[in-house]
């Protein structure tokens, strides 16, 4: 039996919100645009840099180390 459109739950598309949050600095972030530029200059994407800076509470050294560690292939 096929579901009718009224019985199918609607899923909101939060992809744009997620993209925005990984590309922009939030008021709660403990790092600056200059910090992002400094690490992206090493060759990492803005999204990767922001993710790691948030993960390490703005600690540039730890974020950079994590990015380099993730970039290694064995």
Image (spheres, helix red, strand yellow):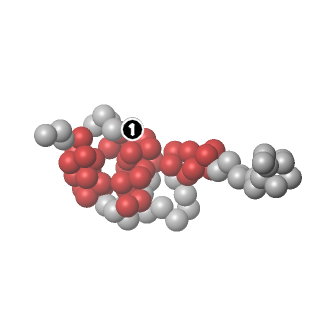
Residue at 56% from the left image edge and 62% from the top image edge: 27
* Horizontal relation, residue 18 to residue 60: left or right: right
Name the spot of residue 18 as percent of width and height, x first: 57, 50
Name the secondary structure under disc 1: loop
Residue at 18% from the left image edge and 41% from the top image edge: 72
* Horizontal relation, residue 53 to residue 70: left or right: right
In depth, the one of 11 and 70 nearer the eye is 11
Q: Which residue is mark 1?
A: 45
* Horizontal relation, residue 14 to residue 1: left or right: left
Residue at 39% from the left image edge and 45% from the top image edge: 48
The quarter of the image holding the C terminus is: top left
Name the spot of residue 64 as percent of width and height, x first: 26, 50
Name the spot of residue 68 as percent of width and height, x first: 22, 45
In depth, the one of 33 and 68 nearer the eye is 68
Numbered disc total:
1
**Direction front: furthest residue:** 1
Using the rendered image of the protein, determine whether residue 34 is visible from the camera's viewpoint. Answer: no
* Mark 1 crowd level (few <14, some 14–19, many ≥20, 10 Å Cα): some
In depth, the one of 35 and 19 nearer the eye is 19
Taking 13 as reference, is 26 above or below it?
Answer: below
Name the spot of residue 3 as percent of width and height, x first: 79, 49
Using the rendered image of the protein, determine whether residue 65 is visible from the camera's viewpoint. Answer: yes
Residue at 75% from the left image edge and 55% from the top image edge: 9
């Amino acid at each position: 039996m096929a579901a009718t459109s009224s019985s199918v739950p609607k899923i909101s598309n939060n992809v744009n919100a997620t993209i925005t949050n990984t590309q922009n600095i939030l008021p709660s972030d403990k790092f600056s645009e200059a910090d992002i530029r400094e690490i992206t200059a090493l060759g990492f994407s803005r999204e990767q840099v922001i993710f790691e800076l948030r993960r390490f509470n703005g600690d540039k050294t730890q974020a950079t180390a994590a990015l380099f560690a993730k970039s290694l292939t064995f």
